[in-house]
Amino acid sequence: MSDIDPVTLSVVQSGLQQVCNEMDLAFVRAAFSPVISEALDRSDGIYSKEDGALIAQGELGLPVFVGTMQFSTRTVIERAPEISPGDIFAVNDPYLGGTHLMDVRFHMPFYYQGELFAWLSNTGHWPDTGGMVPGGFSAHATEVEQEGLRFPPVKLYKQGELDQEILSIFLSNMRIADQRIGDIKAQSAALFVGERRLTALLDKYGVDLVNAVIAEMRARAARQMRARINTIPDGVYQGVAHVDSDGVVNEPLKIDMKITKRDGELHFDLSGSSPPCQGPMNSVLATTKSSIYLAMKHIFPEVPINAGTFEPLRIIDPEGTFLYAKYPRPVSGCAAEVSQRIAEAVFDALAKAIPERLFAAPAGTSGNFALGGYDPERGRAYVLYFFSGGGYGGSAQGDGLTNGCSTIGISKSQPVEVLEQRYPVLFDEYSLHEGSGGAGQYRGGFGINYTVRLRSGTARASMVMDHGRFGPNGMAGGAPGGVNRVSVARQDGVYLPPHLSKDQGIALAAGECVHISTPGGGGYGDAHKRDPALVLRDVKRGYYSREEAERLFAVVLSGEPLGVDADATKKTRAGR
């Protein structure tokens, strides 16, 4: 045990957290793209100088980046030939500890009094890095080059100065390049803020004490995770989840999760999963491991987050499956979609061991939607990237949350008012996806409906989503949640994507629109045991029609005054 007193430990630990939080805020407030400034699709952290292990992460960071930035920082440590104060390495290569090409990681060595102390790292989602379609979500890509510009660790800043030659290579290979410079400077500014704040922390408490606190934080996190794992009975637990298709071959992909609990550790075996796929739903190893990390953090949220949290989690590299993508397999769907299926497979397996801790499956898709075109009013090109929420699964504690964020993050949908100001679009509808909550004693939460109409010019729409074939699983006898749906209303009729919720390059003219419904969460427990008063309440609120409620929950509501028309709950703007 450490001889650091608890008060000092807590103060210094909070100080490290505060450094990361200020990096988060600097990034968000300075970023140009709404996906970063409004939706918070980014993360910042402090990482070990030896191996890139996580020391602390900002509270506004996406959980899926926790693991991947560890692997990415380690790659930079191994590959960087020379480093100096003020250097910043940029990398987006998925196979080098990453996710997809749009998630660009910056890494800066942090020096204190002339000695390397740690690395400051962050990730930001750039709206475009080139490739076949605006936004990078190439649903039909068969090799990574079709998804965008891929770069290994390159020194974008040299001793604090931006390298204009490297910057010109970046900007020459992506759309709306003039707008990317704002995000690049915001991302680097966050690291420089972290440099100043961490220096002040070390000035106050000293290197020896801060290093001792970091070591103690890691040891305590490992002990706490082992203690939680020991509440799981020894044994082997099997879980399964499916991806609708890979976007190229219209067949489902299987995630076969075998978890073995023994000796205070969990061993994860994914070797029974589907082989590598042709389309972009392959997952790189860093994302696969990070998905398991975040799943366990969902189950045991009280365990503090640092590298020690992951020490009792032993993951066998799933060689020969689509969950260990190697060059040149396309991977645009790995971070936002496959990662969530991996987490669901963990939930499905451990629900058999600790049902009181688990819940029915959440919506499990980020609903990646990109629209790229030319705005004739502003005289410039644009790329709109939008992701949306869905329902959470019900649990023994109650109904699932409606329109919650994805499993992998704490990000939020961008305000439609901001998007309408920035791009030539109009949101005709933004409403609840009624009936999408899976039936159960505790029903799932509801997804949403939204309709995007192109106001002027022409554009191309692309989407990489999931749960269009299979709704999120119920638990303990609960029903699955409603599925994802996509339709495109054009002058020549309604177009439905052959892969349900994956397509690319759909041409739109002014006045045409895309309608999307996101999944609801799975239900928990026998729907016939749901309190009839709650069923009546849901019908009055328009969540289910009378007929749906009577069929799903086996109740009779014909004699009840329902009062509220379901259509009255919708917020539409079709007449505007």
Image: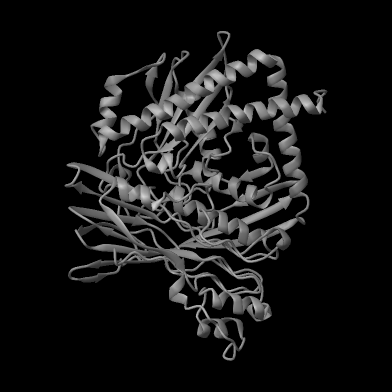
Quadrant location of residue 556?
A: bottom right
Question: Residue 249: x, y in percent?
Answer: 34, 62
Q: Is 512 in front, or is 254?
A: 512
Q: Quadrant of residue 196?
A: top right
Colour pattern: one colour
Residue at image x 63%, y 19%? 201
Residue 330 seen in this snapshot: no
Residue 429 horizontal/vertical position (percent): 37, 64
Q: Is residue 499 above or below residue 183?
A: below
Out of 430 and 23, give the one closest to the viewer: 430
Give the percent coordinates (x, y) of residue 134: 27, 47
Residue drawn at (38%, 26%), measured in percent from left and top? 185
- For the C terminus, the image quarter is bottom left
Identify whether 406 is placed above or below 562. Answer: above
In this view, the residue in front, 513 or 559, is: 559
Task: Identify the residue at image location x=54%, y=58%.
Answer: 272
Please state the horizontal and vertical placement of residue 191, each as a whole percent of the image.
Answer: 48, 24
From what the image shows, is residue 257 above or below residue 551? above
Q: Is residue 424 left or right of residue 478?
A: left
Q: What residue is rendered at 47% in x and 76% in y? A: 566
